[in-house]
Image (cartoon, helix red, strand yellow):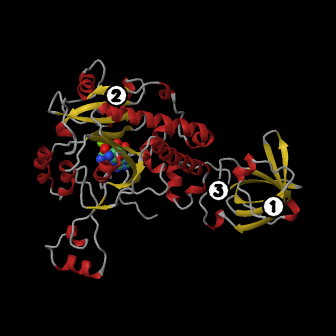
């Protein structure tokens, strides 16, 4: 009857049975008598070998999609082979007609990225997509085991949560709008989404803060958008962020504990379930010894002193400044490549919603988590729950956040949370240098064609 996924062929016992598979040819070895095909269907990293009579088959090319049926046999220990008595080509794949990948040739990530429409079928990227899938499932399982409720937060929003002015504005693209934009110079694009200022969200945090007051523990994993005009290997215009909020939290340590537990749990599960795909999609050797060590914690002040000490750090650093990539990477190296929290930041470096430290009002109870290969992986804080203080801070932000202020007026709690860049996490565990190589269809400045 129906066809069987190759992953199931390796998991269950179909030996001696007649089965059908559907997939793409990875390689063809033509001998006088027999032709051998390696076929993959994306269900796992393994290929199934098919052997068939050279005389009876049409021209088979690597890249073509096929449906094959025959008896499954044991070739060697751990190696199965399908004796294909019937092979149907569904879609031919010919380099001469413009398919950009020739058989048995290795291509660089930069080359493959030019053909995003074909990238999911390459060996390395299909492994990456399975790792990404397992990471997604593991995150959801982890949060549910911890009693968190998943919330769908909006993509269209009227707030710029981070206040960094890196928002994309949404406009209603109809004739009327276009006419009014060209006719009167006074109508700015901000006014053109049904006359309200509307952005693509930069963070789900403020909506999660509304939800957490009532659900106690909430999280989301969704797309976020940043209009940074940056060509960096760590920035996308559209990326996925994992964000969590927790009510009745008074200490930044509780947030740190959560982030550490999450990263260790999810990474261990990926190593357990997807070791093969992890290896195939990694760019370099990745050291996972951090899984058995406690994360390092530095205060901003300690980090600053390390960076100003010329016997330790040779670059430039001014106390009170934010950390750039060079600083972040140095601190992680200095801490033995163990993930490192930097906490208690100068208020001036951080967004409006962070809570002041009890011991020093010039600091906020914030954390940045720094890791190998990427630098900043996550950011979080305790949230300012002082109604009067927030009220003073908000009007200067040019956005309507009365509803946010209401959260501090009615049934308010001390709360906190964090956001973690999902693509940067994949870069971290896979040692991948370019963030565009860990998301199926990357968006970055001037690149949104596919
Ligand atoms: O540090 P960020 O801007 O923090 C927030 O947005 C908070 N509101 C999160 C929260 O507390 N709920 O972003 C969080 C993380 C960063 O640490 C980084 O890993 C990632 O998101 N990130 C990006 N990833 C890819 N491309 C970009 N342009 C990114 N900007 C931030
Ligand atoms: Mg940050």
> Nearer the N terminus, badge 2 or badge 1?
1
Left or right: 210, with 240 as reference point: left
- In three-dimensional space, the C-alpha distance between marks 2 and 1, rounded to whole angstroms, equals 56 Å
Mark 3 and mark 1 in contact? Answer it, CB < 8 Å: no
What x and y, as percent, mark residue 221? 42, 51
- In three-dimensional space, the C-alpha distance between marks 3 and 1, rounded to whole angstroms, equals 26 Å
Left or right: 257, with 171 as reference point: right
Q: Which residue is mark 2?
A: 331
Q: Which one is closest to the eye, mark 2 or mark 1?
A: 1
What residue is drawn where x is 56% and y is 44%?
Answer: 281
What x and y, as percent, mark residue 253? 32, 30
Left or right: 407, with 83 as reference point: left
Q: Secondary structure at mark 2?
A: helix
What x and y, as percent, mark residue 106? 61, 48
Q: Which residue is mark 3?
A: 102
What x and y, as percent, mark residue 71? 85, 55
Mark 1 CB near ligand 1 (8 Å cut) = no
């Amino acid at each position: 009857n129906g066809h069987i996924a190759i992953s199931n062929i390796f998991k269950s016992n179909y030996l001696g049975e007649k089965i059908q598979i559907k997939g793409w040819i990875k390689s063809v070895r033509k001998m006088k008598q027999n032709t051998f095909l390696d076929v993959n269907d994306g269900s796992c990293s393994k290929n199934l070998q098919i052997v068939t009579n050279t005389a009876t088959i049409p021209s088979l090319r690597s890249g073509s999609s096929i449906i094959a049926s025959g008896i499954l046999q044991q070739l060697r220990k751990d190696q199965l082979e399908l004796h294909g008595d019937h092979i149907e080509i569904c879609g031919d794949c010919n380099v001469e007609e413009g398919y950009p990948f020739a058989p048995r040739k290795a291509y660089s990530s930069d080359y493959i990225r030019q053909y995003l429409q074909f990238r999911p079928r390459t060996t390395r990227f299909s492994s990456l997509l399975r790792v990404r899938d397992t990471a997604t499932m593991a995150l959801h399982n982890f949060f549910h085991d911890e009693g968190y409720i998943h919330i769908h937060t909006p993509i269209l929003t009227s707030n710029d949560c981070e206040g960094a002015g890196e928002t994309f504005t949404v406009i209603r693209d109809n004739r009327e709008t276009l006419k009014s934009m060209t006719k009167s110079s006074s109508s700015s694009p901000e006014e053109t989404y049904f006359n309200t200022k509307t952005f693509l969200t930069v963070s789900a945090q403020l909506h999660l803060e509304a939800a957490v007051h009532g659900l106690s523990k909430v999280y989301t994993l969704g797309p976020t958008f940043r209009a940074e005009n940056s060509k960096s290997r760590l920035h996308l215009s559209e990326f996925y962020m994992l964000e969590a909020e927790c009510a009745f939290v008074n200490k930044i340590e509780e947030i740190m504990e959560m982030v550490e537990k999450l990263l260790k749990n999810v990474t261990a599960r990926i190593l357990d379930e997807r070791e093969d795909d992890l290896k195939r999609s990694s760019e370099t050797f990745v050291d996972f010894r951090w899984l058995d060590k406690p994360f390092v914690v530095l205060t901003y002040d300690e980090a600053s002193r390390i960076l100003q000490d010329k016997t330790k750090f040779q670059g430039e650093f001014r106390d009170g400044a934010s950390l750039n990539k060079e600083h972040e990477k140095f601190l992680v190296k200095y801490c033995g490549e163990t993930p490192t929290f930097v906490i208690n930041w100068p208020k001036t470096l951080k967004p409006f919603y962070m809570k002041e430290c009890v011991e020093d009002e010039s600091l906020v109870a914030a954390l940045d988590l720094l890791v190998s290969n990427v630098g900043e992986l996550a950011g979080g804080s305790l949230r300012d729950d002082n109604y009067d203080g927030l009220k003073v801070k908000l009007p200067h932000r040019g956005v309507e956040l009365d509803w946010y202020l209401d959260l501090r007026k009615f049934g308010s709690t001390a709360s906190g949370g964090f956001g973690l860049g999902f693509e940067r996490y994949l870069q971290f565990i896979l040692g991948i240098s370019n963030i565009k190589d860990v998301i199926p269809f990357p968006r970055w400045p001037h690149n949104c064609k596919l």
